[in-house]
Image: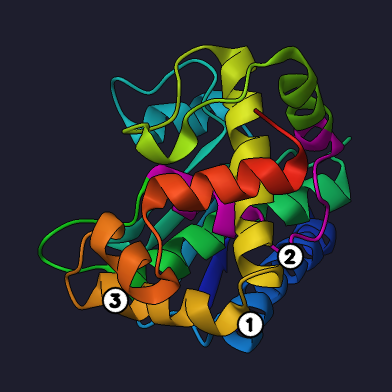
Amino acid sequence: REGDVEIWFYAGGASIESDARRGIHTALKTMRETFGAKLERETRLILYADINRMRAALGRGTSSWTAGAAIADFNITVLHAPARNRDQRDFAATVAHEITHIILAHRTRNSFGRMPAWLHEGLAEFGNVSPSFSYDIALDFAVHSGRILPITSMPGKPGNPEDVIIYYGQASSLIEYMVFQLGPENMKILMAALKSGSNIDAAIEDVYGMTKADLENNWRDYIGAD
């Protein structure tokens, strides 16, 4: 156990436990200290050394590329955790990312809707223990090749794998802009507005005094994109 998170594993010993604890601690600390968000219910992190066993446990329809899932409705995160030859920083970062998804679901869940994917994914990367340079590279590529996605108006993540990397790079960059340029307190207020049942468009206008499109365009100006 680390905080309110139970860690279940059957392989990897003290090493896998240590990596998992580090990722959980990072997520809990970052969300608590920066946004005042925390787990509101106990959750469970289940680690499978065998990825095929993990996919079987997740059930039919699980994609062949799935390496884990955060299932907030059941307060469970399931991840592939190789017992050997594991990049410890990347694994801890993945744990932090997925546990953050559970924290955000608890902080913003309401009966009328959920936090949009771009906000969820960007916040899940915020303050991560091992920022992905591939996201930065993909974002830089998209800026210079005119491939920036209309991220705040997209209903979810794109289907093209190359666009997915760009999407994550954009989401991470947009959240950094919102936090560091517009203030972490405003992000706290935005989360509270979503919790109260406000939709994302109205919440952004109320908190930031601009439309969602204006927010994205201001961020595009900030990073030098069209």
Amino acid type shown at disc 2: Gly
**49 sits to left or right of 56:** right
Rendered view: 52 above or below 222: above
Image mark for residue 34: 1
Rendered view: 63 above or below 151: above
Disc 1 + disc 2, Cβ < 8 Å = yes
Kindly give the residue lying farthest to the left in the view shown.
Answer: 111
Q: Could you tell me which quadrant the C terminus lies in? A: top right
Mark 3 → mark 1, Cα distance in angstroms: 17 Å
Please, what secondary structure does the residue beneath circle 2 have? loop
First to last magenta residue range: 117-136
Q: Residue at x 69, y 68 (%)?
A: 181
Residue matched to label 2: 127
Disc 3 + disc 2, Cβ < 8 Å = no
Q: Residue at x 40, y 70 (%)?
A: 209
Mark 1 → mark 2, Cα distance in angstroms: 10 Å
Residue matched to label 3: 193
**101 sits to left or right of 92:** left
Residue 25: x, y in percent?
Answer: 69, 76
Amino acid type shown at disc 3: Ala
Residue 141 is at least partly visible in this image: yes
Amino acid type shown at disc 1: Thr
Residue 190: x, y in percent?
Answer: 39, 73
Mark 3 → mark 2, Cα distance in angstroms: 23 Å
Q: Could you tell me which quadrant the N terminus lies in? A: bottom right
Provide the major secondary structure of the magenta segment. Answer: helix
In the rendered image, which quarter is residue 192 located in? bottom left
